[in-house]
Amino acid sequence: MDKASCLTLISFLIFSFFMAEIHGRNQGEVFDKFQKSKYIVDSQIDRSDFNAQEVVVDYHIVHSHKGLKEKDMIDKLPGQPHVNFSQYGGYVTVDKLAGRALYYYFVESQHSKEKMPLLLWLNGGPGCSSLAYGAMEELGPFRVNSDGKTLTKNRYSWNYAANVLFLESPGGVGFSYSNKSSDYDTSGDRKTATDNYIFLVNWFERFPEYKKRDFYIAGESYAGHYVPQLAHTILHNNKKANKSKINLKGIMIGNAVINDETDNRGTYDYLASHAIISDQAANDINTFCNFSSNVNPIQCQTAINEYDRDVSFIDSYNIYAPLCNNFDLTALPKNNSWYGVVPVTSTKYSIKKMNLSTETSWYPWFFNGEVGGYVEVYKGGLTFATVREAGHKVPSFQPGRALSLIMHFLKGTLLPTTKRQV
């Protein structure tokens, strides 16, 4: 992927994984429950709430932020070691009438912050905290020690590559809230994209030095919806304003939930190919289930019930791992287990639907002298990369490889093709 692609079309990186996570299943569990609820007989979920649309935002929603940046500065987190970068945390109101505000945590780069790009991180779920997961378990500057009281530095923090902004979204997630309780019952992708956009417009007023900075959006899992829909909203409003209000350069999504049809079929095909569910169950699901519709025949529900029985005594997020019955353990060992929800097959099916032409054919990329994963580059600015021995939350399981991935993406360079490259 070269710099030129950013001039006509934002760069787009999808990354996936090979090995499953062993613990920390909550983000995946939330998504699994959400998906199943959409396809049960007589589901009451209005799936139109989860479709992208153009959102026009008027600028009367921009508020005064004088003095708020200084108030948001964090001197030191509890149990934090000394660091050489600034960090901030606070609320940005996105709907004054409803009293809805989103919480952010922002860490400036470890070096050359004036030259580094700005990266927004969104976790998925839907409903998972970007502070609890993204910042404290994945790519933030700290890790929580086993005592639960102190922090240690994360040597692979992404603020070595960018100024990183973590956003708790939508309202009701983490520290974000609304004074109108009905907001929690009417959330959806469209409202989330609008709120996130309003947040950004106001955040840039609070941090005006970042207004012209190269801006990227990244996330994982259900952020496969949040990230591109926010990007769409930004580009649409930039075009409407006839100038770049937000200097968006690219988006990056990991283990992305993109399309119900390809995501679900990829999951069931993956599990059938690994002898977890029967070929008959997989065939019945492919025959009777329409994942683009709210209404499905009883045969679909019967097939999904068989799938549930087949996986009920294993961890579908780590299909080869032994069950752990000792709840007093504070840490679990890694092993060669495989992830079975939004697997690599789902991502491949989604990309195939795009009918893109290949620019750089599938090749292994390297990190620390060994294969870090595999990558393929498509014309138009899209790159598909895998990360070996990583779980659903890639930066948690392969922090070094994840940092290498984001560094090359932000620089617009290809991932290393030989052991000798860094």
Image (spheres, rainbow, N blue to C red):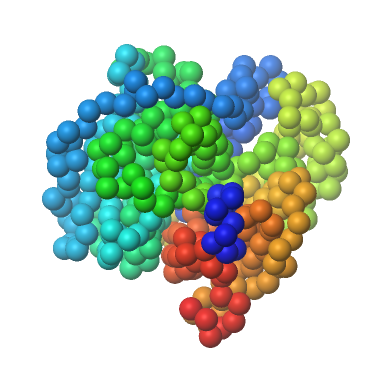
Asked whether, in this view, residue 81 is left or right of residue 251, the answer is left
Q: Nearer the viewer, residue 126 or 145?
A: 126
Q: Is residue 319 visible?
A: no
Percent of width and height locating residue 272: 77, 51
Within the image, what quadrant is residue 326 found in? bottom left
The N terminus, quarter of image = bottom right
Q: Position of residue 222 (x, y in %)?
A: 54, 40
Residue drawn at x 68%, y 43% is 263
Q: Position of residue 158 (x, y in %)?
A: 38, 60
Q: Quadrant of residue 132?
A: top left
Q: Measured along the vertical axis of the image, is residue 176 above or below residue 231?
A: above
Q: Please say if 337 is above or below 31.
A: below
Residue located at (34% from left, 23% from top) = 61
The answer to which of 364 and 118 lies nearer the viewer is 118
Q: Quick check: 133 left or right of 418?
A: left
- In the rendered view, would you say 40 is above or below 103? above
Can residue 76 be seen here? Answer: yes
Q: Name the residue located 69 percent from the left edge and 17 percent from the top edge.
A: 42
| 133, 98: nearer the viewer | 98
Q: How many numbered discs, if any? A: 0
Above or below, comparing residue 34 to residue 182 in the picture? below
Residue toward you, 85 or 63: 63
- Horizontally, residue 45 falls left or right of residue 213, namely right
Place of residue 410 in the rendered image (x, y in percent of width and height, measured from the top left):
47, 60
